[in-house]
Amino acid sequence: MISVQEAKSRIRTFLADKRSVEQLPIAEAHGHHIAETLYAPIAVPMFDNAAMDGYAVRLAEFQAGPLQVQGEIPAGIDHVPDLAPGTAARIFTGAPIPKGADTVSCKNGWPFKTAKFLQESSPPNLCLQANISA
């Protein structure tokens, strides 16, 4: 067994050897780390999307009472229907947020039946823009 000081010394030596910077073609970069932070020039994806599975809703309507579930929005869909007033849409992680929705309620946070939410009380952590990646 080695001492803590010896272990730290070996780690420093190992890391010092790895700090050199070299430019490589992408095809040869496997196993290497990037030397500086890179930022995408555009937002990817270019739309707000669901950060988790749940229901896309208007928060004010959701807190007021039951909402009719109007359908599902899977990830990868090309056309997203607008969210009609008084409705919710089942939504999956990565799917685009429909126009009219401002919040995604986690699917595990609410009891529901086939076509309606059973609104009992709002979860304390649900807020405007919750569970939406912008």
Image (cartoon, grey):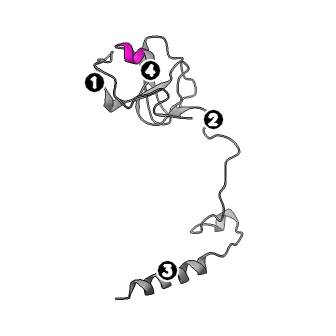
Which label number is shown at residue 111? 1
Mark 2 sits on what residue? 46
The residue tagged with tag 3: helix, strand or loop?
Answer: helix
Query: Are the residues flagged by discs 1 and 2 in contact, CB closer than 8 Å?
Result: no
Q: Quadrant of residue 32?
A: bottom right
Residue 86 spot, x, y in % from top left: 43, 11
The residue stretch that appears in magenta: 61-65
Please give the name of the residue rendered at 34% of the width and 88% of the height, measured from the top-left corner. 1
Nearest the viewer among 101 and 78 is 101
| CA–CA distance in space, label 3 to label 2 | 42 Å
Which label number is shown at residue 19? none
| CA–CA distance in space, label 4 to label 2 | 23 Å
**Residue kind at label 3, given as amino acid type:** Ile
Mark 4 sits on what residue? 59
Residue 35 spot, x, y in % from top left: 65, 65
Q: Residues within 10 Å of mark 3 (few under 14, many from 20)?
A: few
